[in-house]
Image (cartoon, rainbow, N blue to C red):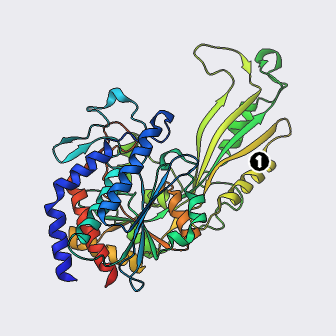
Amino acid sequence: MTDHKKVALLYAQDHQKQTLDKMKELIAIPSISTDPERKDDIQKAAEWLKKELSDLGMTKVEIFPTPRHPIVYAENLNAGKEAPTVLIYGHYDVQPEDPIDEWKSDPFTPTEVGEFLYARGSTDMKGQIIATFSAVEAILQTGELPVNIKFLIEGEEEIGGSYLEVFIKENKDLLACDFFLNPDTGMLGPDLPSITYALRGISYFELRIMGPKQDLHSGTYGGVIHNPAQVMTDLLSGLHDDQGRVTMKGFYDKVLPLEQEERDELSRLPLGDDHYIDQAGVSKLWGEEGYTSVERTGARPTLEINGLYSGFIDEGQKTVLPAYAMAKVSTRLVPDQDPDEIYELFKTYLAENAPDTVTWQLDKLAADHPSMSDRKSPWITAYIKAAETVWGKRPLFVRIGGSVPVVVHIQQILGVDAVNIGFGIPGGNLHGPNENVHLPTLYKGIEALVHFFFNLKQ
């Protein structure tokens, strides 16, 4: 096996140009999932993946139609029942290219500038898909796979409401595996290999406060009609106390406490207060007392007001007492919080605090559970060893403040743990203009994956 691994690594290094060429081919397909006019491009990208997976050496490749965009599945199970099976995730859809005038090159003409490749999808996540393909190719072109491989690549990740959860529920036997590899996270720097072991969940709401049947003259009715905008601001301001804690009764009841060992691990991250101040352009930070910035953004639950609307908001003036006020409110959740329970807690807060001079309505717009992987699982241990071999240092463990629903779906439906990695670095501008991938880091990532797959068999 050692000799095979050495030869596979040499193959990967010798075929970096071919890897880059394949990446450019896939990236050049404008597979924007939210744009109905790009439906043919979505199909073209799926067909490209099917052919590439077949050429790669997958013994079964299939495109599964869905009500919207197809799912690509592939497998090679020749390693046998004694070897572990890894299910590798990817999404081939990308964000729109807007604002187009801020791009320095055409978004779908991959352009090399120094060590970087610029194009939409270069880092999120077509580059990551090709990295997994290249690692598998290096192994198969020089011998047999040490593990069984399955690929699950969707076309709806960037638009929400993905059909993927339904697909996983309906195809549990097909997707059965020992663990899930999600290469859709990233690294904290080109020399900072990282493992994302926790992702926050979300419960997202629209709150409406209703008062009079229509907008009223504030001079005539002000002072006798309770202003819905005032009620809204009172309710929202009451959701945090002076220590930055959320005031909903029971909000923290199921939050897993941070043990000292985990706090020590998080303290290794190069993300101090200055990082957040510089990135946000503020003079001072705010948040829940007793926790560092890294802990607040990844390991503690939060509540944010995402948008407000009421009355007259155009330029100029209009003396109006608004008929209603609306707010968008989101909570980011950590293990073991449940988004449905948070919805009920929010309703209880409103019932106890909203005055009887108005009525209110709370709609739940989105909900996903938080996720946590076992940092000591054999799968993560295998990747730690691989990263140490390639980068010469122990990887950092990261808790991300955002949500990746597919990870939760896999954990809950298939009952397996996840390894969340990736080779995009800060400055990659995913979802923004001039999206890019750092090619030397991506190539190192391919080598790390080769080591990883061999480590799994040991």
Q: Residue at x 82, y 19 (%)?
A: 221
Q: Nearer the viewer, residue 258 or 380?
A: 380
**Residue 52, x across and y down, in percent:** 32, 56
Which residue bears the numbered disc 1? 350
| Element type at mark 1 | helix
Q: Picture quarter containing residue 120?
A: top left
Q: In the drawing, does residue 379 fall left or right of residue 446?
A: right
Percent across and percent down for residue 234 are 71, 39
Q: Residue at x 22, y 49 (%)?
A: 21
Which percent across, then down, holds residue 263?
43, 69
Q: Can residue 240 be seen by looking at this rendering?
A: no
Q: Is residue 209 visible?
A: yes
**Depth order, front residue of 224/148:** 148
Q: Is residue 27 left or right of residue 203?
A: left
The residue located at (42%, 84%) in the rendering is: 81
Q: How many marks?
A: 1
The C terminus lies in which quarter of the figure? bottom left
- Kindly identify the amino acid type of the residue bearing the numbered disc 1: Leu
Q: Quadrant of residue 82?
A: bottom left
Q: Count neighbours of disc 1 (C-alpha within 10 A) and say few if under 14, some if 14 to 19, many if 20 or more.
A: some
- On the image, the x and y values in percent for residue 45 come to 39, 47
The quadrant where residue 312 appears? top right
Foreground: 165 or 356?
165
Query: In the rendered image, which quarter contains the N terminus?
Result: bottom left
Residue 227 in the figure: left or right of residue 400: right
Q: Residue at x 37, y 54 (%)?
A: 49
